[in-house]
Image (cartoon, rainbow, N blue to C red):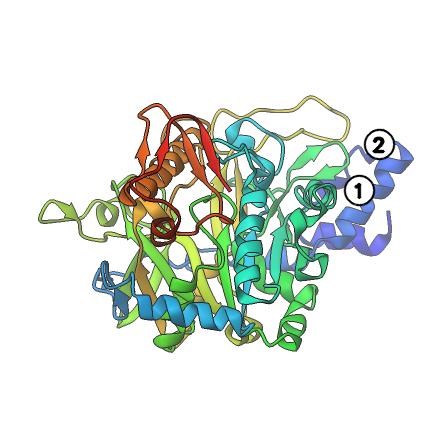
Amino acid sequence: MNESLVQQLADCGQDHLLEDTEALDPVTLERFERQLEAIDWEALRSLLDTWDGSWARVVEPDAVPELPHLVRQPEADSEQARACGEQRIADGRVAVVTVAGGRGSRLGSDRPKGLLPVMPVSGRTFLEHFAACIGERSRRAGRAIPWLVMTSPETDGPTRTYFDQQQHFGLDPGQVVLFQQGTRPVVEIGTGRVLLSEPGRVATSPDGHGGLLEAMRRAELFGWLGDRGVDSLFYHQVDNPAVLPPDPLLVGWHHLRGSQMTTRVVSRRTAEERMGVVLSVAGRTRIVEYIDVPQSVAAAGDGGRLRFWAGNIGVHVLDQQVLAHASGLPWHRVDRTVVHVPGHGSGQPIEPGAANAWQFERFIFDLLPEIETGLVVEGDRGRDFLPVKQSRGTDSLESARAGLLALHRSWLEAAGTSVHPEADVEITPSWALSAEEVLDRSGSDDAVQARTVFE
């Protein structure tokens, strides 16, 4: 172990990581040393020494639910905005960013979440579904829409292999870029001691979707996008199959209102729902993650409904130049339950029964307070938000599939098509991307009697 690294660990109070390293075989020890050398120990020490909770943006006392720049339903479903967005896409001004750094561990799978089958009839995966959307919108635009997929160290290898095996789902490989977000060591609550995930390996966690800024800089993607004339990024997370990227409606509103960051919201169902709250402070829009929202604020009522009603669903349009020149985003400290080993000499994992560790993450929506114009557009929950967060029940694969079946059935029935009560129907992007498009493809003379995929 080189002396400089040993001193860094001692200075940061993390020299416990060097105890019992003689138990490691030479290959594991060399890998462990490379991992330690890649970690910015001074940044971790600074973060732990200065942490007082103020780095993360919490709800300020003067926060109000009245958003300064808001488009509500039904105005939000504007044909003018949709046409504007379609033109922007056709002009090559828009790229898609899909955040795909999470595994399906809470869903009972070790695979990247993007590789899980979510579509209710075809069984297509999240990434296959999004690729179909981007492929269809590229065909209509007459040009390849750039697709940036942000992975994590845990999901990068399997995701790259999947894209290769699927031959990029028929997309031009040159329009698809996979790049990795960064990580931070996981530390023990209270002591700040870095944990080991196994002998010879530091426990780390992805640095949050706000890690997008640094990840794009490392991959030199801002120049790559600029060379292609892209000035807007349609951003979404991989676990919401209701998203049909890039959505021209949100892109259009972003351009028409001269926004630098536009976000879609839906009404929160309950005070306990685990979604960020969109609110206003001193005339500027903020998004506060649910972990930073006091229960008194989350549950505040107003005439039988939640006073702070607007929930963040992780769908944004961002100015490329705003991202490229943004300074560092604040850190959030998140309590997690992390399985770990006590040292290099023991391979027996400790499985805590409660939160035992802190992870440090950045959130992309913390850009909002730093920009001049942030627009909020209300969406339709059943159409725009079918998240997959849990293994069963609400916000699960099961509930998302049920939501997609109900949505696609409603599109067909609105067009006059008869759908048998027990027939499951799925509409693929190549067949239609909206209820309005189904009107042009289906009618009162049509009937669906069996399980069907429209493609």
Q: Residue at x 36, y 51 (%)?
A: 276
User: Can you tell which quarter of the image residue 56 is in?
Assistant: bottom left
Percent coordinates x, y for residue 145 in the rendering:
59, 63
User: Can you tell which quarter of the image residue 386 is in?
Assistant: top left
Percent coordinates x, y for residue 210 in the rendering:
52, 58
Q: Can you say whether 4 is above or below 368 in the image?
A: above
- Answer whether residue 49 is visible to the viewer in this image: no
Percent coordinates x, y for residue 245 in the rendering:
49, 56
Q: Which secondary structure, mark 1? A: helix
Mark 1: which amino acid?
Phe
- Numbered label tally: 2
Of 84 and 38, which appears nearest the observer? 84
- Answer whether residue 403 is visible to the viewer in this image: yes
Q: Residue at x 31, y 62 (%)?
A: 377
Using the image, tell me which numbered label, if any, was put on residue 32. Answer: 1
Query: Could you classify mark 2 by the number of other residues whose Cα lies within 10 Å: few (under 14), some (14-19), or many (20 or more)?
Result: some
Query: Could you classify mark 1 by the number of other residues whose Cα lies within 10 Å: few (under 14), some (14-19), or many (20 or more)?
Result: some
Q: Can you say whether 195 is above or below 148 in the image?
A: above
Q: Residue at x 78, y 53 (%)?
A: 37
Q: Is residue 205 left or right of residue 63?
A: right
Which residue lies most toward the front here?
Answer: 445
Residue highlighted by disc 2: 24
Q: Which secondary structure, mark 2? A: loop
Q: Is residue 266 left or right of residue 87?
A: left
Using the image, tell me which numbered label, if any, was put on residue 411. Answer: none
Q: Earlier in the sequence, mark 1 or mark 2?
A: 2
How far apart are the alpha carbons under marks 1 and 2? 9 Å
Q: Residue at x 25, y 70 (%)?
A: 68
Of 337 and 189, which appears nearest the observer? 337
Mark 2: which amino acid?
Leu
Q: Are marks 1 and 2 in contact (CB under 8 Å)?
A: yes
Percent coordinates x, y for residue 319 in the rendering:
49, 72
